[in-house]
Image (cartoon, rainbow, N blue to C red):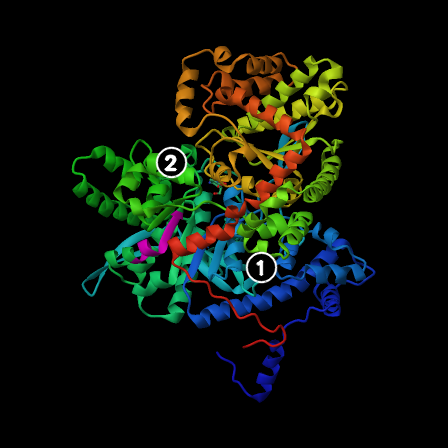
């Protein structure tokens, strides 16, 4: 029902045409308004938390203005949309990011100071929405920032988990997982859409019916729930464009189990309502093995089904012709987790909209694209056909159908090539028959990409070789990137100010490549001094962070050496800590008076979560803490060496840790880290990398120069050879004396915790050392020696630090998103005219 417009209602709606003013007084009055009317608080009963909430609501009001205008404008211009589908978004805190992107940080700072509040302590009140595991989820968040900033008509779609990734506590040196109920204090940033709900079906049966001579397939679900939309505005920088991250929450459907209610089984009916709510209650905390649990499949299907329904509803409002679908919609799959979207769209187009199979396939194929994030075999999703067929019987039928048609084409092209047929098949035969989600994603997409040049090359030469030979043009590379808004402008205000002075403006925030034009400053002693000052201030901030959380007193003048990322054997935190032990033993062997000549004081920090079921990863944390305890309490060592485990690594902690680091470790076994993205953040913040030729490190070396990094270790093509060597020898010969001595020290109980630590050592001593720590250890030690040598020369170190930062332009996610838009999505930017900020055009 459209309201009848008359003169008096028009006058009322006209009230909405004024934008909120951003003077100090206006900001203060909006904050105070929210204190009174949103929070129902008074100045006498008001804490810093309330202050954060009121400020956030006041900022949210401003976001909503831009947000509503953006989609109205997109709608009027009838643009093509990209839908980014991801089971994870690690967006981090919102308040500072929103203020920076709206270019209101200065005004709010002043307004709040006037009221007696320091804006930085207000920021600290916000909890991290941690709806992701690691790199993949954080990448999705950086991409949203770039899509908004570059004015692309985009939507992010995901799940609103009630519990994000667990909070990590360290008790007696072991990781303890604490539930993260992040909505505890409300969430001022989201907009609950009571009117945006979609039904989601599970289980049930499939029947065929003949209607007017045509066969129709009907899937009747036996469990029906509802997905409700929660919108999270994502503001672009230096533009009025603000896009939406729409997160779904599962709720019981209102008709649900009406029968049981009426039959008087009140409690049973309530139980099933709770089961519906449970679907989006918790994020799976695994980042490298797939869970294979029904609940996880329900989560995936809920995201997929609600999103496709939403996109179709939007499309149908505008046009009648299905053949226009790919012209107006691009759908990007963030890994295979949302791959069922391919099948869901096929189902709706054929079963409900009545399109022929081939017609529907054309539309699906031309709109979907898939990003792969790993070649680790244990991470590849394969759903058992029993489980999938029970939960989504019609989808399994469609998958079989897609496979049948696909394999027929293959066998015509390669008659009797059974190996090829079974490698390409969507179905893996065996005692436990499974569906390969990667194969489904490739077959259903017009573009498939890896996330760094080396990774994309490995995909086409190993994991997806047969698919590549079939259709080489489908395969692309899109090297990852990170947003300079959050990772420099927000996280490192000191460096931002310095870069503003160097460039003469803040244009670098939108065009990082211009920093290359200022490389000569790297030799300027005055700039070097200021550069060192900025780093020192950041180190001081981390010093206090560590002191408060870990009770360790670091030497600010020591080299801050950091490895923060999910704990995994392939990332080789174990090799790092074994080197720390090596260094400790070497210091102990050196006469006291010579120690300071031979060793640069170092503070070595580790951080990262281990998946709760990943025992080896948890033992690595145990070892780090055991070494930390021993070394930090050894009077002889003093501040020459400190070892710290930084608990609960997350986005907001990363914003303190990364700007303060001087050396960061990206030391995965060559070929196994698809890209890495923190490496890019560290480089931007003037940190030198010690690393292997893996993932995006290879391209970082191309950009900043190998001479400005500490590269070591086997190259991809040497890894298998090293593994063979290990298989054919005793670990004592293969390891060499320096590593052997380290292992023996652990075995001789120098650090305690013998049971855990022996088991840990066995992963490299007796299990073939799959990640070739033994092979790379010597070359790693040499690289570490080069680090010490360079650090003694402050000016040379600083010069390299400056060059790293100025040459990091390629790794802005703006570059990445432009490439996706141009080479995969075929998407044009659409910028809303920046309003005068006084009158809205409505
Ligand atoms: O994706 C990561 C890769 O390991 C990084 O090399 C890469 O830079 C990053 C972004 O492309 N992968 C990752 O974070 N995976 C997951 O978090 C993950 C989560 C759930 C799951 C499997 C993997 N079932």
**Quadrant into which the C terminus falls:** bottom right
Q: Where is residue 572 in the image (x, y as percent from the top left)?
A: 53, 28
Q: Position of residue 405 (x, y in %)?
A: 22, 47
- Is 35 left, or right, of 214 in this rendering? right
Question: Which mark is drawn over residue 458?
Answer: 2
Q: What secondary structure is found at the residue carrying circle 2?
A: helix
Q: Quadrant of residue 419?
A: top left
Residue furthest right as drawn: 44
744 or 246, which is in the foreground?
A: 744
Compared with residue 767, is residue 232 higher up or lower down, i.e. above or below? Answer: below
Residue furthest bottom as drawn: 7
Magenta-colored stretch includes residue 365: yes
Residue with the mark numbered 1:
237
Q: Which residue is drawn at 66% across and 26% down?
A: 625
Q: Earlier in the sequence, mark 1 or mark 2?
A: 1
Compared with residue 90, is residue 235 higher up or lower down, i.e. above or below? Answer: below
What range of the chain is rendered magenta? 363-370
| Residue 224 in sight from this viewpoint | no
Q: Position of residue 317 (x, y in %)?
A: 40, 70
Q: Which residue is drawn at 38% across and 68% down?
A: 316
Badge 1 density bin: few <14, some 14–19, many ≥20, Cα 10 Å: many
Magenta-colored stretch includes residue 342: no
Badge 2 density bin: few <14, some 14–19, many ≥20, Cα 10 Å: some
Compared with residue 783, is residue 806 higher up or lower down, i.e. above or below? Answer: below
Q: Quadrant of residue 62?
A: bottom right
Q: Which residue is drawn at 58% across and 54% down?
A: 509
Q: Where is residue 23 in the image (x, y as percent from the top left)?
A: 72, 69
Secondary structure mostly seen in the magenta stretch: helix
- Is 708 left, or right, of 407 in this rendering? right
């Amino acid at each position: 029902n459209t309201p009848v417009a008359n003169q008096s209602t028009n006058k009322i709606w006209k009230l909405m045409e004024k934008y909120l003013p951003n003077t100090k007084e206006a900001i203060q009055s909006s904050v105070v308004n929210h204190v009174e009317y949103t929070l129902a608080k008074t100045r006498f009963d008001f804490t810093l938390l309330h202050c954060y909430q009121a400020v956030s609501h006041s900022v949210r009001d401003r976001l909503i203005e831009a947000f509503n205008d953006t989609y109205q404008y997109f709608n009027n211009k009838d643009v093509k949309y990209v839908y980014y589908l991801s089971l994870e978004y690690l967006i981090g805190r919102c308040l500072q990011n929103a203020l920076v992107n709206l270019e209101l940080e200065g005004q709010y700072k002043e307004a709040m100071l006037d009221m007696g509040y320091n804006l930085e302590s207000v920021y600290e009140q916000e909890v991290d929405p941690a709806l992701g595991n690691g790199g993949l989820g954080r990448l999705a968040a950086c991409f949203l920032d770039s899509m908004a900033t570059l004015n692309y008509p985009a939507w992010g779609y995901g799940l609103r988990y009630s519990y994000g990734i667990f909070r990590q506590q360290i008790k007696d040196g072991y990781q303890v997982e604490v539930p993260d109920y992040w909505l505890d204090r409300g969430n001022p940033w989201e907009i609950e859409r009571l009117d945006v709900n979609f039904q989601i079906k599970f289980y049930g049966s499939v029947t065929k019916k003949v209607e007017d001579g045509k066969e129709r397939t009907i899937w009747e679900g036996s469990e029906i729930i509802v997905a409700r939309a929660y919108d999270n505005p994502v503001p672009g920088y230096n533009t009025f464009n603000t896009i939406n991250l729409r997160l779904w929450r599962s709720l019981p459907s209102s008709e649900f189990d009406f029968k049981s209610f009426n039959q008087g089984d009140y409690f049973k009916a309530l139980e099933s309502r709770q089961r519906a709510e449970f679907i989006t209650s918790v994020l799976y905390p695994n980042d490298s093995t797939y869970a294979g649990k029904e609940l996880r499949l329900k989560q995936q299907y809920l995201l997929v089904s609600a999103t496709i329904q939403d996109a179709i509803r939007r499309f149908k409002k505008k046009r009648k012709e299905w053949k226009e679908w790919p012209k107006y919609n691009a759908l990007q799959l963030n890994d295979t987790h949302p791959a069922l979207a391919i099948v869901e769209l096929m189902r709706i187009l054929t079963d409900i909209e009545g399109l022929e199979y081939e017609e529907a396939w054309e539309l699906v194929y031309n709109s979907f694209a898939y990003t792969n994030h790993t070649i680790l075999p244990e991470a590849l999703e394969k759903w058992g056909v029993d489980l999938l067929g029970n939960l989504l019987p019609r989808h399994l039928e469609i998958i079989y159908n897609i496979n049948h048609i696909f394999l027929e084409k293959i066998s015509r092209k390669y008659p009797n090539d059974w190996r090829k047929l079974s490698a390409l098949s969507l179905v893996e035969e065996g005692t436990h028959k499974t569906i390969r989600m990667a194969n489904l994603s490739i077959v259903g997409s017009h573009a498939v990409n890896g996330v760094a040049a080396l990774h994309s090359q490995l995909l086409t030469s190993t994991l997806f070789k047969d698919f590549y030979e079939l259709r080489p043009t489908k395969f692309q590379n899109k090297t990852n990137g990170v947003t300079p808004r959050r990772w420099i402008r927000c996280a490192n205000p000191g460096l931002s100010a310095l870069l503003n002075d160097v460039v003469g403006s803040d244009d670098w925030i939108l065009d990082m490549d211009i920093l290359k034009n200022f490389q000569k400053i790297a030799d300027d002693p005055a700039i070097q001094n200021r550069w060192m000052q900025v780093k020192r201030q950041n180190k001081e901030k981390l010093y206090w962070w560590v002191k408060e959380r870990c009770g360790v007193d670091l030497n600010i003048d020591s080299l801050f050496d950091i490895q923060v990322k999910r704990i995994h054997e392939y990332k080789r935190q174990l090799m790092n800590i074994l080197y720390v032990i090596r260094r400790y033993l070497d210091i102990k062997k050196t006469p006291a008076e010579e120690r300071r000549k031979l060793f640069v004081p170092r503070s070595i920090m580790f951080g990262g979560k281990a998946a709760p079921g990943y025992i080896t990863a948890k033992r690595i944390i145990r070892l780090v803490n055991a070494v930390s305890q021993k070394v930090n309490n050894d009077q002889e060592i003093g501040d020459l060496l400190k070892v710290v485990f930084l608990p609960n690594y997350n986005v907001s902690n990363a914003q303190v840790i990364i700007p303060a680091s001087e050396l960061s470790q990206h030391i995965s076994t060559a070929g196994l880290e698809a890209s890495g993205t923190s490496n890019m953040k560290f480089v931007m913040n003037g940190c030198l990398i010690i690393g292997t030729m893996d993932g995006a490190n290879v391209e970082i070396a191309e950009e900043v120069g190998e001479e400005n990094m500490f590269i070591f270790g086997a190259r991809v093509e040497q890894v298998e050879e090293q593994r063979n060597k290990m298989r054919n020898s005793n670990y004592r010969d293969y390891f060499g004396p320096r590593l052997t001595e380290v292992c023996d020290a652990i075995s001789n109980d120098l650090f305690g915790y013998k049971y855990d630590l022996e088991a840990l050592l066995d992963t490299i001593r007796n299990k073939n050392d799959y990640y070739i720590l033994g092979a790379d250890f010597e070359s790693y030690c040499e690289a570490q020696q080069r680090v010490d040598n360079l650090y003694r020369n402050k000016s040379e170190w600083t010069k390299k630090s400056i060059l790293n930062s100025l040459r990091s332009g390629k790794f802005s996610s703006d570059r990445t998103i432009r490439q996706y838009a141009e080479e995969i999505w075929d998407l044009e930017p659409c910028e809303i005219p920046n309003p005068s900020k006084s009158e809205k055009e409505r």
